[in-house]
Every structure is written in structure tokens, then in C-alpha cells.
Amino acid sequence: MKVVPQLADSGLRIVDLSADFRLRDSGQYPSWYGYDHPRPDLLEKFVYSIPEINREEVKGATLVSSPGCMAITAILALAPLLKEKALGVDRDHVVVDAKVGSSGAGGKPSLSTHFSERFSVVRPYKPAGHRHSAEIEQVLNTLSGEKVRVSMSAHAVNMVRGILVTSHLFTSAPVKPLDIWKAYRSMYEGSYFVRLVRDKQGPFRLPDPKLVVGSNFCDVGFETEERTGRLVALSATDNLIKGAAGNAIQSMNLMLGFDEKAGIGMAPLHPV
Amino acid sequence: MKVVPQLADSGLRIVDLSADFRLRDSGQYPSWYGYDHPRPDLLEKFVYSIPEINREEVKGATLVSSPGCMAITAILALAPLLKEKALGVDRDHVVVDAKVGSSGAGGKPSLSTHFSERFSVVRPYKPAGHRHSAEIEQVLNTLSGEKVRVSMSAHAVNMVRGILVTSHLFTSAPVKPLDIWKAYRSMYEGSYFVRLVRDKQGPFRLPDPKLVVGSNFCDVGFETEERTGRLVALSATDNLIKGAAGNAIQSMNLMLGFDEKAGIGMAPLHPV
Amino acid sequence: MKVVPQLADSGLRIVDLSADFRLRDSGQYPSWYGYDHPRPDLLEKFVYSIPEINREEVKGATLVSSPGCMAITAILALAPLLKEKALGVDRDHVVVDAKVGSSGAGGKPSLSTHFSERFSVVRPYKPAGHRHSAEIEQVLNTLSGEKVRVSMSAHAVNMVRGILVTSHLFTSAPVKPLDIWKAYRSMYEGSYFVRLVRDKQGPFRLPDPKLVVGSNFCDVGFETEERTGRLVALSATDNLIKGAAGNAIQSMNLMLGFDEKAGIGMAPLHPV
Amino acid sequence: MKVVPQLADSGLRIVDLSADFRLRDSGQYPSWYGYDHPRPDLLEKFVYSIPEINREEVKGATLVSSPGCMAITAILALAPLLKEKALGVDRDHVVVDAKVGSSGAGGKPSLSTHFSERFSVVRPYKPAGHRHSAEIEQVLNTLSGEKVRVSMSAHAVNMVRGILVTSHLFTSAPVKPLDIWKAYRSMYEGSYFVRLVRDKQGPFRLPDPKLVVGSNFCDVGFETEERTGRLVALSATDNLIKGAAGNAIQSMNLMLGFDEKAGIGMAPLHPV
């Protein structure tokens, strides 16, 4: 907030990784971030960028806000399901349960990141009221044209890199897997970095952060449960790449007319 | 199923750790377990035992079915909330998101438990249709007097022992934390092995399996989210103790008139 | 150094866990610890306590210095081999290669203990010049009646609790395993906390810290290599128990005439 | 052994990753591998390839034997020190203490690689008599012109990829660090994949497998200990790349006149 407004006023192209320009509605800053936004005029000028969601908008942008791992990973699993009204997804009960590696907490040592304390935890560090719920809802509201309520919980797990998001949705009537695939394909056709995972069985039939670590990929998969009318969507990214710097570089590539994959197009290092 | 029926007929006291006598309704076995139950007459004679839920019933029992980690850990967090009608918990949207250590998969080597494959995973191994949903619903139906739908997903995480269950519930109106504490206390008053966790802040303010590994404790905590009407309940056990052998020994102690804590009463080895 | 001298002068019984009174020769403090010892008179009054080595001396002591995990674990593997002259162990080439969990570094957060940095390391943090070489040599010199040179290297590995010490020794002539067992048994007969491990094959045939974590046990085992005249001794402890507080309590028990196992006699929590 | 001899006779270029053609002296096969070598004539035709040691020889070779992680990582640290006679390294007391990730044991599930058993171990799985001692001695004998005795011990540690080798050497007189650097530089000048690590302090001042995982690099560093006349050499590789497939591809590149780095020249994915 101290530097970006001046740079923005000067006309420079900016990809901002902070949360300062993510929400369009300045009225949301006091409740989510605890301050009045000093430059509400800039909020509508920043494009919230996840290229797989709004590639064309990013291409023409000068000011871009690139979100974090929780939002990107959740949105990539949820967006097609909430945009496609025929699936009948219940907007009021969207549960997002995230499992995140330690690097999501940054590089500053503290008691909660001290190895002897953090090793082998499954620590529910933010079960309710997570700030990034706001931006996820913002994107889903826009895509679906309706008010969506996102109920997010974040857990720290025993690894350094990677995030898995388990999204629990409910549908008004049973949905066919084929229709869900169609919704995903329709939105991600031509998007190199989103991979739809659909092995029939075995340990690798669903997204797992381990398989994307070191890459800009987001793996997406799902299962349905007819008995309860539930649709479970699963998405995995490397929180430091597609969930942070990779998405920013991808956004920059688009803004500058470069190949979208430039500098981030290689395969992950740890394929199975 | 091969041995227990004969032993049961002979009048011996039995604590069965298999799933063979967990469901009261024999009609559920074909859909959940894929077979017709050969001895439906025994189902009503077995007591499904979680002492903190039905201690008196267990005390008088000859035949007991002791459940597994997923069911015990979920039920201990959910039971008071669904029994107490004044909390207004929505019976149709009960999401149970479990994170389990490798020992939950047993001792038999396989590709999915091979160290080089399993290390650092967050693997959604059963996102929908988990068998133990049936017994959790059975207990909650009885306690609440209503039909409850449990939507459970199970994930394998990077540790050996322990399970964390995150339960996402929705209430018809905002609930006060004090009323939730009351519901828990009312049910677990005098139950040594259930600990209500309520630190105000810091890394240990919510249940974490790491803090119960090696013990028969189940730690329970929660947070509420007014904006979405959500109540997040968290519960953690050592899946091999309170989630398996410990609960069985505790049940046996009650059946035989021993001290409930005999043989399992010590504090966990790895407190923080 | 600020408190203990006064307490010692007052006649209180003391078990000191610091390194301040471990070396008998005050002349060694400048080179190993960088300071002149302010109270050399106290050095000869403190008994360096590893009960399995000098139980009788500890029983009569008022002032005791209880060593750390590196020294205790190395000494318990080495002492019988260097005391028993018939084994012909070369005093000049005693290599001690230690692998230690993170808790050995204490509870203070830092860059090197930050989870994202420390996870999955095999970090050689002190390959040469380790301070505790001095006290190991002191014990071995006394037991063997000769000058022993200990060459120690310490590595941080990917776990919280536990230490494995691999000691590489050379013998002037081939030694029989039976004679090595005899040397160990002769010294540790009646010592509950030292367990000699000797399975013929399988993954548990040699000491592993995982199998002693949570207990005051030290597991000791060995293999011989005729071709090179080498004797490899292996020893494992929980660095926080037998390698620290447990050894101190055991020492206190002896000083006060209590049962040596009081408070620390239980089996480890994670047996295989 | 079943396929390669025929292929070799046909004149094809071969890079063999097995141990079948590593030792020049067929007389060593019975004792180390338990069989009489069926084609001793081929042994002298195979070049044992570590390009940093014998690049020119590999360039002209038709038949190449590419060694494994233990041998490559140990040899790269030891070769310059034993070749350079002025350092005065004692040939009879060369201790090689290796710490290896689980992938070194291959992909086949077993009790010892079962996650619940292997997690958090420091397991000394081959403290004496390791087969690869023979090939390490073969290389060092050739380079030094003297008989070298290698005393190797292998330990499994809590990670998937990577190996750290700690080599303990003794010198007849104190050696200057500068002379050790010279020995290393003299041999590895122009060798892209060997990196000499020499930060003055901090957690990254010595080789750690974590920093080379995903790459073909071998990091080498050392410390000296004047008191005991010891020289501790440390070397780290990714056992699956420089310790296996990467070294083989590098060898193939040389045999075919390709750029030595082709296909394996990228930087590691997880730098600090």
C-alpha cells in the first residue's frame, strides 16, 4: 500500500501479489482487513488475475492483482461448477477445506513454524473467518450471477510445498459425472496449466499436491455421492508457483504479449 | 464373521473390532458392505460402544462392537451438537473431512503405502461413499431422533499415527460459543478421555492429533463463523488407541466392572 | 555458572545438565568453551554421571553433572569396547558419526530450525571440533587407562526426537562377535536401560532411534567387517530422555536411594 | 547378465546400470556377489564411468558401466584427496558413512519400505560388508597407485530422494584447507556438475542432499580437525539423478559426442 499507488499513478504495468487491491468493494476492507482503503479509486482499475478464469481481461490490463494459493486453488475447482447453472449447485453450502504446506506461512521463523513444533502436525490454523473467503466469493458471484457463500477452513500439514483443496458442494438433483467433466472442459479448454485428473482407480486417481510440486500446474478432479447429493471437487497446486509467483509470471506474460508459458512451462520435477 | 457368531452363541463376552456387527439394520449390509448378513439376529444383541456416548449400555453388555478411528473421532465431535436441538444444526449438510495417518491403512505393504510413494502426500483416498458414514449416521439418528445425512471425505496425510476430523455444520441461527461448550460439557462431564480444548490463541488452541498420539484421549474444539452460519467442530485422536484398541479396552473395562482407565489411563508421551 | 556454584557451596544435592562442570581438567575450558573456569575447585567435586558406567560413584555423590545426548549415546556404545583391552581396539581412529533429531537444537526458533528450511535435510552441522568430544575422551581415557582420540561428526536429520550414533572402530586382529557381546554384557549386566539388540535379520536387527523414542532406553548393537578390521558399534537413544532429562532423573534416583527406574521405568510408546 | 553380453558382442554402444560389469577383476565376483562371472572377457572392455573422474576414457568407450549413488557420491569426495599424495591421507582408515533416502531401495513394496515402519527411521541397514566398497576401492587404487581400504556403512533416513556421504580420513600431518581446495579444483576444473561448497557459516555452508534434489549436481565440501588429524569430506547427490540415471545420460552424451549436459543441465528445482 505504500509503494504501489504511486507506481500505478505513473502508468507502469504492475502485478501486485499483496491483498491490497484484490477486492473491488472498498467497503469490504474494514471488516476483512481492519482498515479503510486509502485509494478506493484504484480498486476498479486492478484486474484480479487467474488467467484460466479471465485470460482476455488480463491480456489488456495494466494493473493486475495476482491472488494467493488458497484462492487460486479453490477457485479453479469451483468456478466451472458454479458458473454452470444446470448442475444445480447449492450456493449457500460451499465448504472449502484446505490442507497447506509450511511454505504458505512464509520464511520468518516463529514458534508455530519451529521444526520441533510443526513436524507431523495437522493443525487447523484458521477454521473460520479466513480473509481469502471474500475474494473467492467475489469471483464466484461474478461468474454465477448469484450470491455465493463460501465456508473455508485452513489446515497446516506435514510438508513444505503444496496445497490440496477439498470442496464439498451439494446439488439439488443428482448430477452425471459426464456433465461435470463438460463444465470443466468447457472452461479449461486450451488452458495448459489446468489438468483434469480422472484415473479409474489406484493411488493417483485424484489430485495430490505431491504430483504438482515444482510446476505451475493445477490438478483438478472430483467424485460424486448420490446418497447425500454431494459433489466433492479436489484441486492441488504448488502454493509457491501456481499459487503465487507462477500465476504472477503467467499474468505478466499475458499482459506483455509473451507466450503464456514462458519461464514456467516445464513439467514438474517429481512426477510419479 | 467366521468365528464371532459361534463365540457369541456360547455366551462369552466379546469386544469385536471388525465392522461385522456395527449396523443394527441388516438391510444396510448389502449396499455398504456388499453381502447379505448371515446372522441378522445377532445385530440387535451387539452394543455399538463409544463409552462417552453410551457408557451405561456398555456396562451391561455381553456383546460389544467397538468402532474405528473415523467413526469414533467424528461422533465425539458431532454427538453433542446434534443431540442438543436448541443449537439448530442443519441435519442435511453435515460435512466430515478427515485427515488420517498411514497406520489407518494397516500393516500390509502395497504400492500406495510404499514409503517413496506415500511420503509427503495429501491424498484424497475416499472422498465419497465411505462405509463408516453409515454407522456415524446410525448413532446421530438415535441421539437426535431425526434423520441425519453425513457427508464424509477421507484424506491420507504425511504422518503415521493420528487423525483429525474437521466437521462443518450449519445452524439455522447464530449460536453462542457458550451454548456449544454447554452441549459438550453436558455430554462429557466425567468422561476422562474427552478433553475440551479452548486456548484463546497460539498454535495449540485447537485439537491436533500430534498432541494425543500415544494416548486414549480425544481432543475436541470448535470455532463459529457468523457470516455463513457455520460451526466448525474439530476432533483429534490417536487412530490406533482411542480410534481402535484403546476404545476396545475401555469398553472391556466397563463390561467387566474394572476402572474405565485401567491399562490406558496414562498421559500422552509427546505433550508440547 | 551463575547459580550452581552458590548452591553447591550451600551443600545442596545438585544434578547439573549444563556443560559447566563436565570436564575435570580446568585447563580444557579455554580451548573447548572459550573461557577460564571460575571455579576449578568444584570440578573435582562433580561426578560425571552415566549410571551404567559409574553407578556406585553416583550413589554416593552430592554434586552430579549429567551429560547430553551425544556423549551418553556414544559412550554407552564405546565404553565396553575400549575398556576390554583383549579386543585390541585402535585408540587413535575412533570415528563417531551422529545423526540427531531437531529437538537437540532446543526450542528457540531460528532460520536453521524453520520448518520450511529444515524439513528433509541431512545437514552436517558440526563435522569437526565438536565440544563434547572432550568429555567422551575423558570417560574413555579413564576406563581404558590410555589416551583415546575421538573423531566426532554431528548431522541433523529429518525427525524431532532421537539420536543414532555410528561408531567406527578398528581392531589390531579380527574379533569374534561373541567376545564383543561378552564385553557389553559384562558392563551392562543388571543395567535395565541398556538393551543389546541382536536380531539375525530384518529391518529391526540393529538399533534405531525410532524404537526408543519416549523411553529412557539406550539400544546398542554392532557388526564386524573382517576385511578392513572394522568394528561398527551402533547406539540409539531418545535425546530428550536417556540423552538428557531421563539420565538426570536416573542419577537423582541413585543419589537419593530411590529405585533407579522411578518415574522413568516405563516401556517406549512406539514399539514395533 | 542375461541380455547385455549378447548386445555387447553385437557391437552396440551400451550404458549398463547394473553391477554386472563394474569390477575389473573377475576373481572378486564370488566373494562380493556370490557367483562366478560368466564372461570375464567383457570386464576389461567395460569402462567404469564417472565422467568427472575419467571423462576422456568415457568419450572413446563403446561399453560403459555406470555406477550407483553410493559409489559415485563417495568417489567424487574421495578421489582428489587420495590421488594427491602430498595430502598424506592414511590409506587404511577411510571411513565412508552414508545416509540415503528411500528411493535407493527401489519401487518394490516390502515391510522395510512400508510407510508406517519406515517413517522417521535412522536405520543402519548395511553397517559392514557393503558390496559397493569393492568398486570404490578399485577406483581409488587406480588413482592413488596404492591399496586403499574403504570402510563403508549405509543408513536409511527419513526422506525419499538424496544421499549424503560423510567420509572420515586421517592425514599423517596437518593439512591446509587451501591445499584441499587445490586438490578438488585441480580434478574438477571444468566439471559443471561438481560444485565446491564453501560458505563460511550458516545452515548452508556444507553439502546437503536437499539442495541438489532434482538435479545432476554433486555438492562437495569439507572440514579439518587438527587435534585428531582428521579430514571430513562431505558430498551430496540426488541418488536418482547424479547417483543413477543422470550419470548414465551424462556418460551417453560423452560417448555420442553430445554436449555433456544435454537433457540434464538444468538447475535443481528446490534451491534455498
Image: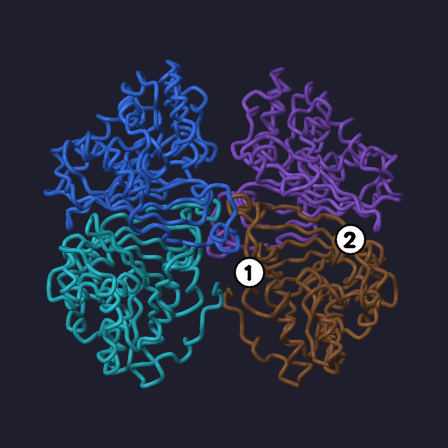
Chain colours: A brown, B purple, C blue, D cyan
Counting labels gives 2
Foreground tag (2 vs 1):
2
Instruction: Name the residue nearer the viewer: A98 or D113.
Output: A98
Can residue B4 be spotted in the picture? no
Residue sticking out furthest to the top:
C257
Residue D169 figure quarter: bottom left
Label 2 SS? strand
Q: Is residue D140 above or below residue A226?
A: below
Please give the label number shown on residue C224: none
Side (left or right) of D258 relative to B50: left
Q: Is residue B39 above or below residue A145?
A: above
Side (left or right) of D127 relative to B12: left
Mark 2–mark 1 distance (CA, rounded to whole Å): 25 Å
Residue B116 in picture, x, y percent from top left: 46, 56
Residue C246 in picture, x, y percent from top left: 41, 28
Residue D156 in picture, x, y percent from top left: 37, 50
Q: Residue at x 73, y 44 (%)?
A: B167
Q: Is residue D254 above or below residue C246?
A: below
